[in-house]
Image: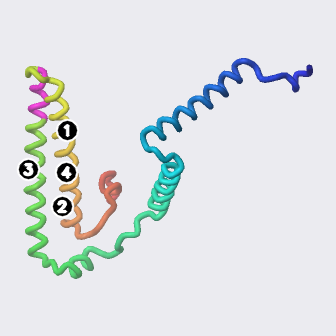
Amino acid sequence: MNEEQKAPGLVSRVTRRTAKAGKGAAKWWMYSTVGDVPAEIEHRKRTFAWLKRLIARGNRGRVESFEQAMKRLGVSAAELQQRIAQVERMFYVYAIVGVAGLASLLLSPFVNNALSQFFMSAGVIGVCGAKAVVCRFRIYQMRERKFVAFGDWLLGRA
């Protein structure tokens, strides 16, 4: 036998069998949990196609200036100043709760359920930090009276 005509080696035969067995096991597991494999495969294809269309569509939001939005919503300058003060108060509440979460995080090694308190405190800090950043972004937009992208504002390009 020539080199080209040799049968596949032991490793490639085992690899093929393992791949077929794994594929069969996945189908068996899907059938045992779902019951209808072809319908499940079609459902997954439709779901992935929907996600692909959703991602490809992009942002088709409204394009308008800040003044046009104020006119459309019927907001006066005095109401805008009230809203700025309200969002600033919300920012301070989030900052205070975040600081309390930080204090709880720092005290977590000294309590009985240290790990659970650590994760709870870290979650509170994360949520409050994110909401505080959003408040600062909204305040910037209202004070400057212009819409900017969040990424541009965050990186200081606005």
The residue to which callout 3 is attached is 93
Q: Which residues are magenta?
A: 102-109
User: Which amino acid, mark 2?
Assistant: Ile
| Residue depth check, mark 3 versus mark 2: number of the one nearer the observer | 3
Q: Secondary structure at mark 3?
A: helix
Distance from the alpha carbon under mark 1 to that under mark 4: 12 Å
Q: Is residue 129 above or below residue 83?
A: above
Residue 84 at x, y percent in the picture: 12, 64
Outermost residue on the right side: it is: 1
Q: Could you tell me which residue is drawn at 22 percent across and 54 percent down?
A: 134
First in sequence: mark 3 vs mark 2: 3
Amino acid at dot 3 = Val
| Residue 123 - label | 1
Residue 79: percent from the left, percent from the top?
10, 74
Give residue 109's position: percent from left, percent from top: 13, 21
Of tags 3 and 1, the one toward the viewer is: 1
Quadrant of residue 24 in the image? top right
Residue linked to disc 2: 139
Q: CA distance from mark 4 to mark 2?
A: 12 Å
- Distance, label 3 to label 2, CA atoms, is 15 Å
Q: Report the residue marked by disc 4.
A: 131
Q: The residue tagged with tag 2: helix, strand or loop?
A: helix
- Mark 4 crowd level (few <14, some 14–19, many ≥20, 10 Å Cα): some
Residue at the image position 48 percent from the left and 61 percent from the top: 53
Which label sits in the foreground, 4 or 2?
Answer: 4
Q: Residue at x 65, y 24 (%)?
A: 15
Does 59 sit left or right of 124 as displayed? Answer: right
